[in-house]
Image (spheres, rainbow, N blue to C red):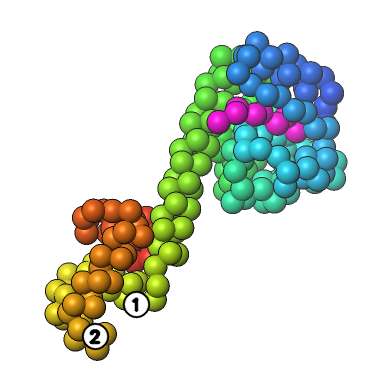
Amino acid sequence: MTRTVYIVDDDDAVRASLHSLLSVRSDLIIRSYRSGDAFLEEAGDLDPGVVLLDFHMPGSTGLDVLESIQGREFAAIILTGQGNVALAVQAMKAGALDFMEKPYEAEALMQVLERAFATLEESSETSARLDAAKGKIAKLSPRETDVLKGLIEGRSNKVIAYELDISPRTVEIYRANLMEKLEVRSLSEALRIAFAAGLFKA
């Protein structure tokens, strides 16, 4: 994953100092925005990344930006003045991952960034697993899904056949088909995909 940092701060000096602090890292792509509005205008087309976000800005505040990017692939770190705990708490409730007090120490900033990228990468992997599982389940016909449901609930082929009003042989065919479509060899693997896709509650 490309590691991108978005600096969103209306203070030119703060943006410049953060940019120079981060430019020592060759693995980072750094993009700066002088307002929350400017960032939000482009947010829909941006790659996942960590947002260093000032709280007090004209137009869209840090809180407005946080609310707008919730559920998207951004990890936000709020930049606050020293000792503003109430504001930091408000930001965390709105979905900020962390906060940094100004002035920043380079080492502390890098540590917070590392944690943010780790969280982002983990959520990206989880999301990819969910999408893959949902994609596989979507290939099943309604009858194959019914058979899978029966198998997960621990029913035998005969019981499933009786409940669906089909022959046990037909259940076996559906079972073989669904295993093939899910690309699994065992029921436990099929079960894992079904749970990962949110098809059945654990």
- In this view, the residue in front, 112 or 81, is 112
Q: Residue at x 62, y 14 (%)?
A: 25
Q: Residue 166 has which mark?
A: 2
In this rendered view, identify the residue nearer to me: 94 or 41: 41
- What span is colored magenta in the figure? 1-8
> Is 76 left, or right, of 148 in this rendering?
right
| Residue 85 visible within the image | no
* Image quadrant in which the C terminus is located: bottom left
Q: Which mark is residue 165?
A: none
2 in the magenta segment: yes
Image quadrant for the N terminus? top right
Q: Nearer the viewer, residue 156 or 32?
A: 156
Q: Which residue is mark 1?
A: 143
Q: Quadrant of residue 133?
A: bottom left
Identify the amino acid type marked 1.
Arg
> Which SS does the magenta portion mostly show?
strand
Q: Marks 2 and 1, Cα distance to the nearest angstrom?
A: 10 Å
Judge left or right: residue 183 versus residue 44: left
Q: Are marks 2 and 1 in contact (CB under 8 Å)?
A: yes
Q: Secondary structure at mark 2?
A: loop
Asked if residue 13 can be seen in this view, the reply is: yes
Q: Which comes sooner in the sequence, label 2 or label 1?
A: 1
- Residue 88 drawn above or below residue 132: above
Residue drawn at the location 33% of the way across and 53% of the way down: 183
